Amino acid sequence: MSDEITISELAKLMKVSVHQIRYFEEKGVLHPAYIAENQYRMYGVDEIYRLSHILLLRKMGLSVQMIKECLSNLTTVQISSLFRQALADTEAAITQLQQTKHLISKLLQEKDHIPRDEDQVTYYIDTREEIHLSLWFHMEAQEYLQARQLIQLKENIPNLFEADIHYAYDETDTVGIYTQKEGANDLVLPRGKYLSRHVYVHIEAELKEHINEFYAYAEDQGYPYHGPLIMVEKSYLSLFTPEKLHYELLLQMIE
DNA sequence: ATTCTGACA
DNA sequence: TGTCAGCA
């Protein structure tokens, strides 16, 4: 038995697919040590080390074409700038993953607030931390968001459909639409007790009734409130109840 | 049994 | 990138 190994042995050793090794060869970055009589590709230690380098560079986001160039002639200064770039890239990837992790745990928490059935009325009173809101745009109180408006407005909001969209209703007949943003102060909901209710509806027109019901409940219970009524749209919760739109209604209570 | 090439989604 | 056929 020769000291060289077959392509499948190399694949297992390096935890890559056989196909990928042949692909590297086709692109001219990794050639077998020699070809056996039966046309099998055979690989030695040099190729093993070379493949490990290729995989390392690939992890750093380099195209196979770039790897080919880097592997033939690489100065230490070039390679360290390469590593710096890869470091920045992976740090960016980590923050992205942390954001989705945060979103997932929020989703798991919020799904517990979904009322069991549509007609069940559940109110909560709890203490909220300060919420900083940034104004997105104003809208007539009777209107609803249209697709075309989203096209015009989406630039301002990254991950729009993963965000909590805050509608602030006051005495005027326009509604302010806000997104949560650190350090923003277009509208600040102070820390304190809030009356809260989660609702979900088929069509937005049902919301008006829920809002009136919410006001009525607060007054029936003799809860003095302060500031605008906040309606928080949580579109991501529709994952749990398809075809329905989720909202939380909020009123700050005077203590 | 394993690999090779080539084609395809 | 994975998969599959047809071949050696």
Image: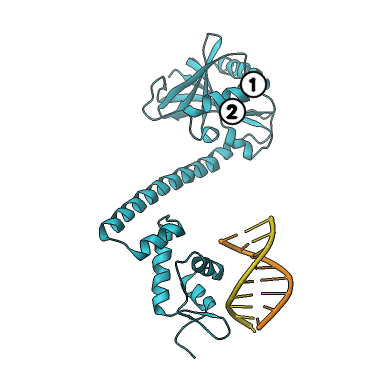
Chain colours: A cyan, B yellow, C orange
Q: Disc 2 sits on a residue from what chain?
A: A
Q: Is residue A102 above or below residue A82?
A: above
- Residue A247's tag is 2
Under tag 2, what secondary structure? strand
For the C terminus of chain A, the image quarter is top left
Q: Residue at x 54, y 24 (%)?
A: A152
* Residue A12 vertical placement versus A198 (above, below): below
Q: Which residue is mark 1?
A: A207
Horizontal and vertical percent for residue A143?
Answer: 62, 16
- Judged left or right of residue A8, residue A244 is right
Q: Is residue A222 left or right of residue A128?
A: right
Q: Amino acid at mark 2?
A: Tyr
Q: Nearer the viewer, residue A112 or A55?
A: A55
Name the residue: 36% across, 53% down: A86
Mark 1 → mark 2, Cα distance in angstroms: 9 Å
CB of mark 1 within 8 Å of CB of mark 2? Answer: yes
> Residue A7, percent across and down?
52, 76
Near-viewer residue (A20 or A240):
A20
Q: Name the image quarter holding residue A207.
A: top right
Residue A121 appears in the figure: yes
Element type where label 1 sits in the image: helix
